[in-house]
Amino acid sequence: MTGPESEPGPTEWVTGLPGPHSVGVGPWSEERDGPPPPDPRYDPELLEHGDRRNVVDQYRYWTREAIVADLDARRHPFEVAIENLGHDANIGTVVRTANAFGARAVHIVGRRRWNRRGAMVTDRYQHLEHHPDTDALAAWCAERGLPIVAVDNLAGSVPLERASLPRRCLLLFGQEGPGVSGGARGIADSTVSIAQFGSTRSINVGVAAGIAMHAWIREHADLDAAW
C-alpha cells in the first residue's frame, strides 16, 4: 500500500461533485435515522461530512485502515507483477483491476516510480511490492514457493483458454509494446497466451492483465463471496 496521503485522488475529485451523478453518501445525519452505532471502523470525519470515495457501499464511512483489514481477510492467493522499464502508464490500470479481483499483492519490477492516476486511488487499499529486477522477483517468489506464470503471446506458450492456472501463483506481465523481457521469460515457470483473431500483434497490457486475472477468478474464486 502507499503511504498515508490525505489528498483526495482523481476519483474522489470527480465523484465528490454535487449533482445527480454524485457517487457515495452524504453525512450520516442526512442519510440514516438515528446516531451511528459505536463501531470503531467508522471514520468520524466521514460520518460528519459524507463519503464520496471510490469504494463499494459495504465500506461507506469506514476508515482506510478498517477497509484494508477487511480486504486482507478476503484477498485471493494469486499475485500480479508488471515490469516497469519505462514508466508504463498502464500500471495504474493493472493495480485497479488487481484490487477489484482481490489479488493479494501487486509487484512493480524495475523503476520504483509509476503513474498512479490510472489506479483511481485503489493503490491505497492494495498491497504493493517493489523489486529492482526480475532476479529479485524470482528470489522473492522462490522463498515463498510461488510459481510464476508469464502472460504473453510467445512461441510455445499455452493458450490461457485451455490452461489451468495454479491456485497460488504470480501472474507476470511485461512492458506495454515489447511484452515480457528476456529476464522475465527466464524466471517464468510457465507462459500462457491470450487467443486473438485480429490483425494487431498484441492487446494492451492492462486489458491482458484483466483477462488473465478474471481467468483465475473463474477457475478458483468463490463467486458467492463477490459483492
Image (cartoon, rainbow, N blue to C red):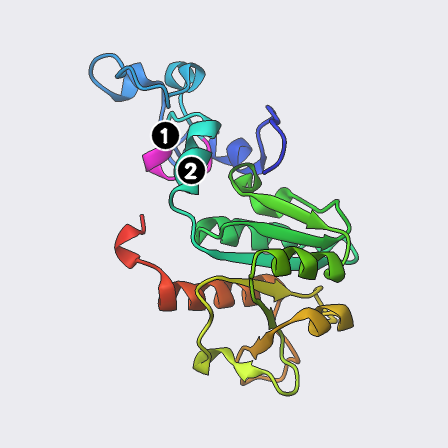
Decide: is 54 above or below 78: above
Q: Position of residue 16 (x, y in %)?
A: 47, 29
Task: Tell me whether the residue at label 2 lies in contact with that at label 1, contact meaning CB atoms closer than 8 angstroms.
Answer: yes
Q: Per the image, is 220 magenta?
A: no
Label 2, on which residue? 55
> Residue 116 occupies which quadrant of the picture?
top right
Task: Please name whichever residue, 89 or 179, is drawn nearer the observer in this view of the structure.
Answer: 179
- Mark 2 to mark 1: distance in Å? 7 Å
Would you name the residue on which mark 1 appears?
A: 60
> Magenta residues, as a range?
53-60
Q: Quadrant of the N terminus?
A: top right
User: Helix, strand or loop at disc 1?
Assistant: loop
Amino acid under label 1?
Answer: Arg
Residue type (three-letter) at the residue carrying disc 2? Val
First of labels 2, 1 by sequence position: 2
Q: Quadrant of residue 58 in the image?
A: top left
Residue 219 tag number:
none
- Of 130 and 204, the residue lying toward us: 130
Residue 197: image location, x then y, percent:
54, 85
Measuring 56% from the left and 43% from the top, which residue is drawn there? 127
- Which residue is at a point 38% across and 46% down the rendered structure image? 74
Q: Which residue of the protein is positioned furthest toward the left in this rendering?
A: 33
Vertical side of 206 occupied by 121: above or below: above
Secondary structure at numbered mark 2: loop
User: Residue 203 appears in which quarter of the rendering?
Assistant: bottom right
Left or right: where 127 falls relative to 32: right
Residue at figure coordinates x 44%, y 41% from the top left:
72
Of 120 and 212, nearer the camera is 212
Q: In percent of the image, x 66 and y 87: which residue is there? A: 155
